[in-house]
Amino acid sequence: MQAVLNKIKALLGPDSVVDGARAAAELGQCTTGAPRSIAAVVYPSDSAQVVSIVKLANEYGAPLYPVSTGHNWGYGTTPITDGCIVLNLSRLNRIVAPVDPVTGLVTIEPGVSQGLLADYLERQGLPFMVPTSGAGPSASIVGNALERGFGITPITDHFMAVTGIEAVLPDGSIYRSPHVVLGASSGGNAFKWGVGPYTDGLFTQGGFGVVTKMTLALARRPESIKAFVCRIATESALEKIVSASQNIVQRLPGVVGGINVM
């Protein structure tokens, strides 16, 4: 393990590799309550460095566990086994292709958080919504979509908004969505399913590769947005609340973005 970490330190610089007690403190535990022993946390700055790290991990047989920003509170951020090198992608935080003002398509890296995209849309004066979740402004949009996260914006299933991805495969080669490989323009990216068998879904909740770019469609901001919060006073009322919520969502599609029962 130390040999591959020395190689990664030479590639990224010592300030981009955290090991020992600091690694355990940063990503050794999460909301699941299951602590993990972590070999190191490494912080690449671009997709080329991700490729090099994946190749080194493959060469040395070192287990690699990617996270986007490390704030995926719902499903946890710790590796599934001890002794992993955590690949933290939070420094890959570019908006690679700006928001298309007509289609709402945007291409981002894993480090782009809900807060970062919200600030961008505000600065540019663009009438689109961030695919938010309850994880907060520091949570990754890419990470949430890959975990098939939900939110209360009009596109409640966040992976349904994804129209293309780019990922680093275990041997260091690059996967791109088939329609992109075939030369689809920005407009062509609006069609989620592309051509042939749908393979982008293999990268959700799985370890087939490290996603470094994602194109997704943002929902247009409506004229008015209202949030309502209510409290269930008794456990016996829960069944009625769930039934009423289903009825509201079915009757008012596009008007009610979603209902979270917590």
Image (cartoon, rainbow, N blue to C red):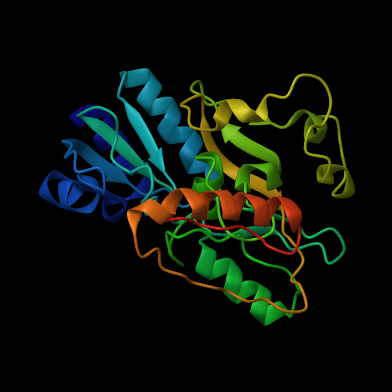
Q: Across the whole image, how many numbered discs are drawn on residues?
A: 0
110 sits to left or right of 20: right
Residue 64: name its quadrant.
top left
Residue 10: name its quadrant.
top left
Q: Going 71% across and 50% down the picture, which residue do you hit? A: 250
Residue 111 placed where, x, y %?
49, 55
Which of the pair 223/161 is nearer the observer? 223
Is residue 149 visible in this depiction of the protein?
yes
Is residue 187 placed above or below 93 in the rendered structure? above
Q: Going 54% across and 44% down the picture, which residue do you hit? A: 47
The quadrant of the picture occupied by the C terminus is bottom left
241 sits to left or right of 213: left
Residue 18 placed where, x, y %?
23, 49
Q: Going 40% across and 63% down the picture, which residue do you hit? A: 232
The quadrant of the picture occupied by the N terminus is top left
Is residue 70 visible in this depiction of the protein?
no
141 sits to left or right of 248: left
Q: Going 25% across and 48% down the picture, which residue do you hit? A: 30
Is residue 231 placed above or below 187 in the rendered structure? below
Which of the pair 195/21 is nearer the observer? 195
